[in-house]
Image (spheres, grey):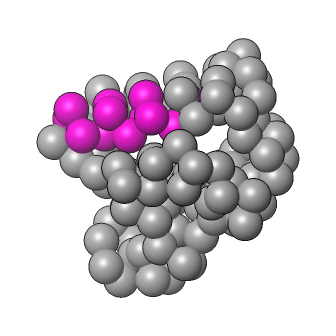
Amino acid sequence: MEYSITDHGNLKLIKLSGRLVEKSQATGLIMEFESLIQSGTNRYLMSLEDLEYVNSSGLNLLIGMFTSARNSGGELVIGGISPKVKKLMVMTKLDSIFKIYNSVAEAAENF
């Protein structure tokens, strides 16, 4: 799994790509995200367009990030999602928890 975190207007854009199957794959992401939360950053837009696969461990990581953003008074929304990952979000009913938009641009516009 690869990731990047960049500024996108007044949001932090988190892009994930590859396969997210173990929490150990995301150690760098977790540490960077927690550091951002500690510094007061709490508005996140996550792009999952290039995420090919995610399992229950990966979903747990996403839920944890969502919870941390919310607990800090902020929000994490998804802008763009691959068909396989979207299908999994629907099957697990996580689409009722996460705000999911068709693209990064649409999510940023409606944030």
Residue most toward the top? 24
Q: In this view, does 66 lie above or below 11?
A: above
Apparent side of residue 49 relative to residue 41 in the rendered image (left or right): right
Q: Which residue is drawn at 74% across and 21% down?
A: 22
Q: Nearer the viewer, residue 22 or 12?
A: 22
Image coordinates for residue 95, horizontal then vertical, percent: 45, 56
Q: Is residue 100 left or right of residue 17?
A: left
**The one of 54 and 49 positioned closer to us in this rendering:** 54
Work out whether residue 29 can be spotted: no
Left or right: 32, with 66 as reference point: right
Query: Of 37 and 86, which appears nearest the observer?
Result: 86
Residue found at the far left of this picture: 73
Total residue callouts: 0
Predominant SS of the magenta segment: helix
Residue 63 is covered by the magenta coloring: yes
Q: Quadrant of residue 25?
A: top right
Magenta region: 61-72
Q: Position of residue 105 (x, y in %)?
A: 50, 82
Question: Which residue lies most toward the front here?
Answer: 91
> Residue shown at 54%/56% (left/top)?
90
- In percent of width and height, residue 37 lies at 33, 33
Residue pictured at 72% horizontal, 16% vertical? 24
Q: Can residue 66 be seen in this view?
A: yes
Residue 59 drawn in magenta: no
State the quadrant of the C terminus.
bottom left
Residue 93 at x, y percent in the picture: 46, 48
Task: Name which residue lies at 75% across and 58% down.
Answer: 84
